[in-house]
Image: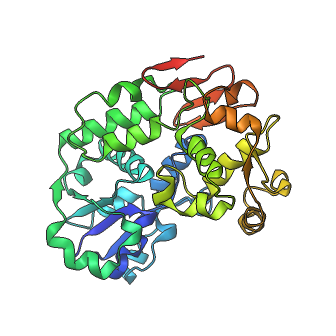
Amino acid sequence: MKPVILTSLSGFDLIRSGLAEVVIPFTFRLVDGPLPLDELAAYVGARSGTVKPGWHWFDYVGRWSQAAKERRHLSLVAFCQAYDVVELWFDRNPNDQLQLIWLLDYLCSHPEIASKAKLRLIAFDLITEEPTSIAKSLPHIPALRVTTDELETASMAWQAYAAPTPERCAELVHRDLSALLMLRPALIDLLAELPSASTGLGATEIRFLELIARGYEGTSALFHLRSLRRTPVFNEWELGWLLQGLALGPRPAVAGLDDELRTIPQQNLPARQVAYSRSRLSLTEFGKAVMAGKEDFSRHNPIDRWWGGTHLTNDRLWRYGPVLTKT
């Protein structure tokens, strides 16, 4: 029997590779907003009438056999019991790595499935590779049996990320994380998104200012040119909310963002896309001072966002630099 593959949304097209009977992509985001802990419990549980649409593990399975379809009401663990091998395909993207440590932490309580699990070491971006190419490359993609080392490392990391302060994550990057080879770089990228000691902004926000200062006035370059932006944590819509925070606060660092974004609901993605596309961005004098480290954005604008289990506000602002500090 072919294995079942558990993956991120980036691996959705793996079903076309023919490598698995069923590919189950996890679609939830863990890098922005409060951690959806209750929803995650429902996500892997048996389907019930109280589960929100899109918040059950079977909701995004692209293709399935009749036998698999008949078991779609089961919990994820119960569904996977029918398979000899459960493969985990998560790449180096920070959200992928968070999904992986959450999943492995969950499997700590289900040794009957953990014992069947194999972790594929994905050294490429799943979303950019053709499924047929992945299938041909399979002999060169290591598959490691999940052991107590992987489970314990993942559980330690997930509990640190979900903690109400980032202190444990900051300490974690100095510990032995070799059981999960792509975890440390992901944690470093995530920690860089905490406000800096000098500017009060995270790595992506500072990169926005730098790119706008260089003449990138359209949002498309900021959102979509990943190699130019060089910050891998957030997706397009999360990037839009970061940009809105820079441009539409009491003392903006960025001018030219369409003002209608103040009132367009977050869920109305088409309307937001139109507003982004007609924006022409530039730095304000304040933005230039922030970029130069002469002003602190957080001292002039409200901060209210989440980093894992940490709620960042102006009076509870964790800053990351050479050391982690709280102001």
Q: Locate residue 9 relative to residue 272 in the image: left or right.
A: left
Query: Depth check: 263 or 85 in front?
Result: 263
Q: Could you tell me which residue is drawn at 42 percent across and 23 percent down?
A: 322
Residue 306 place in picture, x, y as percent: 60, 36
Q: Which quadrant is the N terminus positioned in? A: bottom left
Residue farthest along the front direction in this orientation? 214
Q: Quadrant of residue 23?
A: bottom left
Query: Depth check: 26 or 56 in front?
Result: 26
Instruction: From this view, report whether residue 327 is shown above or below residue 294.
Output: above
Q: Could you tell me which residue is drawn at 61 percent across and 52 percent down?
A: 214
Residue 55 appears in the rendering: yes
Query: Depth check: 201 or 25 in front?
Result: 201
Instruction: From this view, report whether residue 22 is shown above or below residue 187.
Output: below
Q: Quadrant of residue 305?
A: top right
Residue 175 place in picture, x, y as percent: 26, 28
Instruction: From this view, report whether residue 132 is shown above or below residue 155.
Output: below
Q: Locate residue 147 relative to residue 258 in the image: left or right.
A: left
Residue 22 place in picture, x, y as percent: 35, 73
Identify the image's colour scheme: rainbow, by chain, secondary structure or one colour. Answer: rainbow
Residue 5 place in picture, x, y as percent: 31, 66
Q: Quadrant of residue 173?
A: top left
Q: Locate residue 314 relative to residue 144 in the image: left or right.
A: right
Residue 18 appears in the rendering: no
Q: Could you tell me which residue is drawn at 46 percent across and 52 percent down?
A: 230
Q: Which quadrant is the C terminus positioned in? A: top right
Q: How many circles with numbers are drawn on the protein?
A: 0
Instruction: From this view, report whether residue 156 is shown above or below residue 322.
Output: below
